[in-house]
Amino acid sequence: MAKIVELPRLSDTMEEGVIAKWHIAQGDTVKRGQVIADIETDKATMEFESFDAGTVLRIVAAEGEPLAIGTPIAVLGKEGEDVDAALAAHGGGGATAPKAAAAPEPKAAAADEPKAPEPKAAPKASASAESESESEPEAAAPGRASERIAASPLARRIARERGIDLAKVTGSGPRGRVVKADVEAAAASGTAAKAPAAVAASGEVDAHGRPFVERPDEPVKLSQMRKAIARRMSQANAEIPHFYLTTTVDMDRAVALREQLKAGLDAKVSFNDLVLLAAAKALRVHPEVNAYWDGTTAVRRGNVHMGIAVAVDEGLIVPVVRYADQRSLREIAELARDLGLRGREKKLLPPEMSGSTFTVSNLGMFGIDEFAAVINPGEGAILAVGAIVDTVVAKGGQAVIGKRMKMTLACDHRVMDGAVGAKFLATLRGLLEQPLAMLA
């Protein structure tokens, strides 16, 4: 009997996923362990290997469509097997296929070819590895009010961002549909005309009598990662009673130490690496900060696993340096650099982005002097680190220039009180101001 391939759970926080790219097409032969699709989760885009072998009888889910875990995405089996019966037996699966790869609207069909599509044309079109989601309405072409352009949502978004007129782009997808590659090729070649700006009189004029331009709002299609961030930060703000403590650190010795490490040991150590090591050691001194609220009581973590907030195009990820308090500065620096690089390339595995007990978020490289971060659910505190700036300070009765850095600790008031957080910050500040002590 034909086998239903379901959308798998690829991370502990994953609730839905998106087929970013199919690596198979209808009629292909699939082996066990073969990568059949790239799936976008709330944390990364991951390769999905088939658990079964057989011929691809149907691609049920289209690229770009948000799907719940367990939703049928493909059917494998032997040639001639009844796909519809297998989907019906799965329970609700038969209704998923039309939704994931719906036939175009009648107007869209008329714009592409004179005949209406056959009822089963949509599933076949979605079987192509180059096809993209048709779940959203087609974009109206500038200057073609009575027609619609067949284009994937991703292609439309890229066209909007780059100012490309879709009416001038030749589609290579099913039924001449414009896909991502077509828009990128047109942008690279410069052959597609720029889309005319949407200009409309607002009814109001400026001081010179010229009408203001009215520009419409544009809803943003969220990635799975952005959805997860919105969900978790809403949860954090609603459930965790935050309070904030800020301190200023004398970074003169830390700056000098980093220069010595770069010159003498040829070691690539960032200021954030120094903060990570100092925070990990401070957490050993103050285990009450390395804790979380489990719903009824505060739980102190036995290990120190440092989360590092890393900005990516879709939002924010938190890769984890495990057992950070037991590692050397060089180890932390190498791990943090590797995790950050692979995180931006979406190559991290779920275990590398889970299990943190404390997080450091650093916006100093963006010129931010001071900020307050939101605690990750499952942790009791998060450290927000600002830029190192030259500041006029009093030293020995004279005004001199010193390197100063502000840090703000956000604390869960269910887990700790202000005095506990203040003592932790004092230890952390002391380690950064005497950095050789934490290297011993």
Image (cartoon, rainbow, N blue to C red):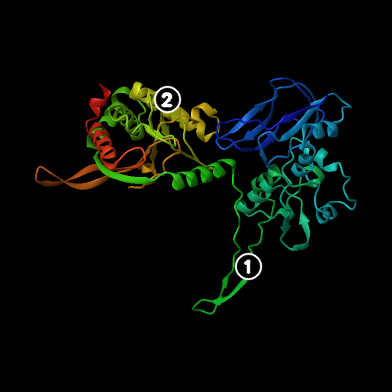
Residue behind mark 2: 322
Residue 126, how many percent across, how many down?
78, 39
Q: Nearer the viewer, residue 284 or 345?
A: 284
Q: Position of residue 98 (x, y in %)?
A: 79, 43
Camera-nearest residue between 185 and 344? 344
Q: Quadrant of residue 320?
A: top left
Question: Closer to the camera, 333 or 258?
Answer: 333
Which-is-in-front pick, marks 1 and 2? 2
Answer above or below: position of 127 versus 166.
above
Look at 62% across and 31% down and name the residue there: 9
Residue 385 visible? The answer is no
The kind of residue tagged 2 is Arg
Q: Residue at x 34, y 46 (%)?
A: 243
Residue 107 higher or lower than 88, as above or below: below
Estimate the x, y position of residue 403 in percent, counting from the top left.
24, 41
Q: SS of the residue at dot 1?
A: loop
Indicate which disc, 1 or 2, sits on the residue closer to the N terminus: 1
C-alpha distance separating marks 1 and 2? 54 Å
Residue 333 shown left or right of residue 203 in the figure: left
The picture quadrant where one finds residue 415 is: top left
Residue beneath disc 1? 199
Q: Residue furthest left?
A: 397
Q: Residues within 10 Å of mark 1 (few under 14, many from 20)?
A: few
Is any atom of residue 329 visible in this view? Answer: yes
Q: Amino acid at mark 1?
A: Val
